[in-house]
Image: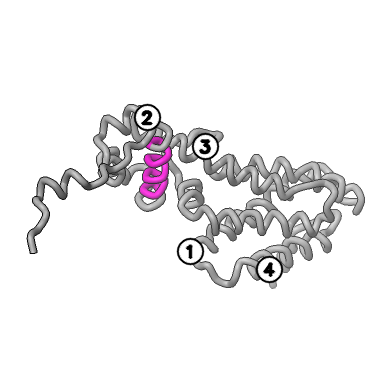
């Protein structure tokens, strides 16, 4: 049976569709995001980003000006996504216990859906500015929690001026648990959230008005 000439077969092959500038930019962001999560900012290179995206290095520079520019856009997107998720879970109309539940689940939901993004946020980088680090992001969320705690503190006869401190503690606890769960993934997400609420809510419920450290026993003669 005669075979089709090789040149003819080549001619009938559909050429790979050329990406638009917007599509190429999104592709580079996706590739960079995965590489930064895997190797960190220092470990990733423009050469490897270009290689994985199957483009030349000048294409990366054309879109982002270099590795730093690409990283900055990736971080900004993740900050916006996580900030939106956390702050969106905090509304004054909800019971304080429900707020803790929502904040816990919002962070765990984000980690589950954006694992690479969360790894990037919790990893320090020289190009992560003061407003783009995970610690500053958590500080922003804690500020949102502050005014919600103030009202509850006043209602329970506690010192409202300490609310900012407790807001940092509460959000920090949730964030650090999220970092642990990122790799452990056990127990299940809902159980982790329930345990977070158990510690946070029961701790808040039984707070003393004037807490003091336990005094050490007097030394024996």
Pointer 1 or 4: first along the chain: 1
Magenta segment: does it hold 30?
yes
Count residues near mark 1 (Cα–Cα under 10 Å), then give few for <14, some for 14-19, many for 20+.
Answer: few
Pointer 3 or 4: first along the chain: 3
Which mark is on residue 135? Answer: none
Pointer 1 or 2: first along the chain: 2
Residue at x 62%, y 54% (from the top left corner): 107
Label 4 SS: helix
Residue at x 38%, y 33% (from the top left corner): 20
Label 4 and label 2: CA atoms lie apart by: 45 Å
Label 3 SS: helix
Residue 163 placement, left or right of 124: right
Q: What residue is disc 4 on?
A: 195
Residue 139 coordinates in the image, percent (x, y): 64, 42
Number of marks in the image? Answer: 4
Q: What residue is disc 1 on?
A: 183
Span shown in magenta: 24-36
Pointer 4 or 2: first along the chain: 2
């Amino acid at each position: 049976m005669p075979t089709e000439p090789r040149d003819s077969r080549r001619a009938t092959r559909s050429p790979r569709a050329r990406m638009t500038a917007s599509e190429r930019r999104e592709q580079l962001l996706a590739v960079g995001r995965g590489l930064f999560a895997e190797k960190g900012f220092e470990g990733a290179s423009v050469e490897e980003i270009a290689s994985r995206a199957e483009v030349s290095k000048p294409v990366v520079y054309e879109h982002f000006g270099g590795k730093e520019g690409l990283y900055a856009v990736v971080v900004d997107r993740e900050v916006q996504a996580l900030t939106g998720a956390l702050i969106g879970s905090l509304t004054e109309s909800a019971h304080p216990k429900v707020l803790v539940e929502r904040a816990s689940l919002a962070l765990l939901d984000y980690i589950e859906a954006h694992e690479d993004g969360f790894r990037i946020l919790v990893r320090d980088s020289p190009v992560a500015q003061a407003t783009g680090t995970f610690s500053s992001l958590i500080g922003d969320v804690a500020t949102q929690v502050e005014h919600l705690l103030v009202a509850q503190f006043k209602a329970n006869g506690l010192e409202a001026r300490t609310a900012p401190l407790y807001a940092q503690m509460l959000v920090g606890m949730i964030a650090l648990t999220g970092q642990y769960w990122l790799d452990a993934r056990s127990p299940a997400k809902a159980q982790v959230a329930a345990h977070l609420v158990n510690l946070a809510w029961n701790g808040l419920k039984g707070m003393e008005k004037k807490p003091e450290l336990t005094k050490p026993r007097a030394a024996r003669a």
